[in-house]
Structure formats: structure tokens, C-alpha cells
Image (cartoon, rainbow, N blue to C red):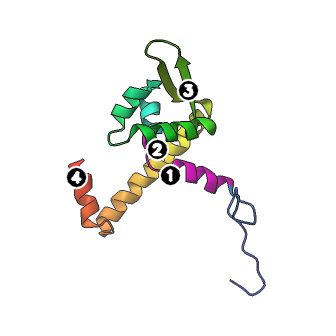
Amino acid sequence: MAKGSKKTAPAGCPETPIPCATGGLLAILTRPWTMHILWVLGHDGPTRFGMLRRKTTGISSRVLAERLRMLEARGFVYRKYEATIPPAVTYGLTSRMDEMRPILEQLDRLAGIWYEEDLRAGRIPKEVKAAQEVS
């Protein structure tokens, strides 16, 4: 970089890195279990809490509840409570996630392309490759 020239911030980010809208969004989406929860809700539609927990194998009820509260607070999911015995709590995706779907699908395609390139180039560690083959 030439002396005296100023580096510009990435699109969507102010000159200072905090707060950055893109970074904030990625921080939410990259939390453990978040993308898995969103995938289940996007694939299966509105889902009750217990079924959602069973479909996200390995997650604890506490972590699932925390992630759902965070996603609800940020407008990614809605929560529908029915005062039945036992109470029925259903979660589903909001229109905000409908807007995000094409972006996530494009990101998934790009990740697949890069993964295949990395496999061919030998950039994937053996233990990661072995884990991918088992699942």
C-alpha cells in the first residue's frame, strides 16, 4: 500500500470495525448450533421444541433454548406458544430468513465448490476427510 493512501472498509462496514453490520450478522450465524437449527426449521417448517431438539442431535435443551431466544430476539425465528396441557411451543422462520435463503444457498454452493477444490489440492486434513466420509 502506498504511503499516505487510506484503505477503505469492506462494503457494508463503517470505517471503524465496530459495529459492523456484516460482522454482527456473521457472529450470530456462526455461533455453535445456529445454522443447524435454522436448517432444520427451513427444511421441516414450523417445529415444536422437543422435535427440534431431537433433530439437532447432540444439542442440550439449555443451549437450544438459548439459541432460539437469541434468534427470536434478532427476528430470525418466531415463537408460537399454545396454552395446552402440556404447553405447545412451536418455532418457525420469519420473513427475514426468507430474504436470507438465497444468500445461504449461494454460500452453500460456493462452500461445496471450494471443498471439492481443497480435496483435489490436498488442503483438507485427513481427520476432516475421514469424518466427512463417516457422516
- Where residue 130 sits: x, y (%)? 22, 58
Q: Amino acid at mark 1?
A: Thr
- Where residue 35 sits: x, y (%)? 46, 44
Q: Check the picture and name the quadrant holding the N terminus.
A: bottom right
Highlighted range, magenta:
21-36
Comparing labels 4 and 1, the label whose residue is closer to the camera = 1
Q: Which mark is residue 79?
A: 3
Query: In this figure, which residue is indicated by the disc labeled 4?
Result: 133
Q: Disc 3 and disc 2: Cα gap in Å?
A: 17 Å
- Element class at badge 2: helix
- Element class at badge 1: loop
Q: Which mark is residue 35?
A: 2
Q: Amino acid at mark 4?
A: Glu
Q: Amino acid at mark 2?
A: Met
Q: Which mark is residue 98?
A: none
Of the numbered discs 3 and 4, the one sitting upstream in the chain is 3
Dot 3 and dot 2 residues touching (CB under 8 Å): no
Q: Which mark is residue 30?
A: 1
Position above or below: 1 against 103: below
Is most of the magenta stretch helix, strand or loop? helix
Of the numbered discs 1 and 3, the one sitting upstream in the chain is 1
